[in-house]
Amino acid sequence: MYKRQTYILQSKKISEEICLIQITDLHNSIFGSDNKHLISKAAMKSPDLIMITGDLLNANEPDNHIAVTLLAELSTIAPTYVSLGNHELEYEQNYGTDITALYESAGATVLNYEYKDITINSQPLRIGGIYGYCLSDKYLETGEADPGECKFCLLYTSPSPRDGL
């Protein structure tokens, strides 16, 4: 089962309405045959962007078909951006698969420690993918996380120089 929640956020920095769908932590879950139920629900919203914040697959299962097929379908609905999760990174280590290339071949844009400036509905946006911060001690011990930083970001507005961050 998945949880669907609708939020309406307002900001002085957003002048045009933007509809986005955020999906996270599916872990190879299937909602309807080939995720058709989930894809249908996403399409009915007519989103401007689809944001996926990691863990579409499981690190210890070799099958990546569910994640790749879902990304291919979602990418036909709206531009789809992915920030990698720990399961994607561990999957790469376990199976030697380049997840970024795999997800991008399905039509998604993977943002891993990087950002892109885009325009949606005449609204300039900066979207970025940052992974690793604020995770368990396992990631502090391996040096993958910085205890002094605690940031997760998949979407924020492009600030003007006078606004700062």
Image (cartoon, rainbow, N blue to C red):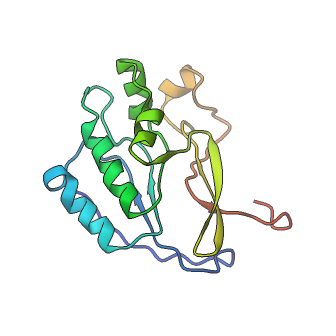
Foreground: 101 or 159?
101
Foreground: 20 or 11?
20
Farthest residue toward the right? 162
Q: As drawn, is 56 to the left or to the right of 145? A: left
Foreground: 160 or 2?
160
Picture quadrant of residue 105: top left
Farthest residue toward the left? 33
Q: As drawn, is 109 to the left or to the right of 6? A: right
Foreground: 8 or 123?
123
In the displayed structure, 100 sits above or below 72; it is above
Q: What is the x, y in percent for residue 96?
A: 40, 19
Q: Residue at x 35, y 73 (%)?
A: 45
* Count of marks, rendered view: 0
Q: Residue at x 31, y 38 (%)?
A: 57
Q: Residue at x 48, y 25 (%)?
A: 138
Q: What is the x, y in percent for residue 103?
A: 41, 40
Q: What is the x, y in percent for residue 63?
A: 24, 31
Q: As drawn, is 88 to the left or to the right of 32? A: right
Q: Quadrant of the C terminus?
A: bottom right
Q: Residue at x 55, y 53 (%)?
A: 154
Picture quadrant of residue 80: bottom left
Q: Quadrant of the N terminus?
A: bottom left
